[in-house]
């Protein structure tokens, strides 16, 4: 169980950051610059852990495929082939189902 204020903070950070893909240090910078706007969210690690666990964000990276071309690969916790934990050395991507309602592009 997570407090409604914490969930609200998570979505507010995504809205303020306003990007569909980001590195950990980018979202951390946004968090630090706007820290007074978050009531319950303690740090970016908490944001990443909760968001990844609920499928709000996933990891994305480039990897060579069988034709030796770079292809985008994804990891979502809820998928059978997904990783159990987020990889902070890789970019994060906001779930497609949330992009239109949270990101002002």
Image (spheres, helix red, strand yellow):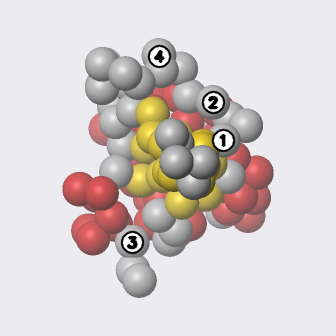
In the rendered image, the quadrant that contains the N terminus is top left
The residue wearing badge 3 is 103
How far, Cα to Cα, is label 4 from label 3? 26 Å
Does residue 60 lie above or below 34 as drawn?
A: above
Q: Earlier in the sequence, mark 3 or mark 2?
A: 2
The kind of secondary structure element at disc 2 is: loop
The kind of secondary structure element at disc 3 is: loop
Does residue 18 lie above or below 98 as drawn?
A: below
Instruction: Farthest residue to the front: give it.
Output: 67
The residue wearing badge 1 is 90
The kind of secondary structure element at disc 1 is: loop
Residue 39 visible in the shown view = no
How far, Cα to Cα, is label 3 from label 2? 23 Å
Residue at x-position 73% and y-position 37%: 89
How far, Cα to Cα, is label 2 from label 4? 9 Å
Residue 84 got which mark?
4
How far, Cα to Cα, is label 2 from label 1? 6 Å
Residue 23 got which mark?
none
The picture places residue 10, in percent across and down from the top left corner, at 45, 47
């Amino acid at each position: 169980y997570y407090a409604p204020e914490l969930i609200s903070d998570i979505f507010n950070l995504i809205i303020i950051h306003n990007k569909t893909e980001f590195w950990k240090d980018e979202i951390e910078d946004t968090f630090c610059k706007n820290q007074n706007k978050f009531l319950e969210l303690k740090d970016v690690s908490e944001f990443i852990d909760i968001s990844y666990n609920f499928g709000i964000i996933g990891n994305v990276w480039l990897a060579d495929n069988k034709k030796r071309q770079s292809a985008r690969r994804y990891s979502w916790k809820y998928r059978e082939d997904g990783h159990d934990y987020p990889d902070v050395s890789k970019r994060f991507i906001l779930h497609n189902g949330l992009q239109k309602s949270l990101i002002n592009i």
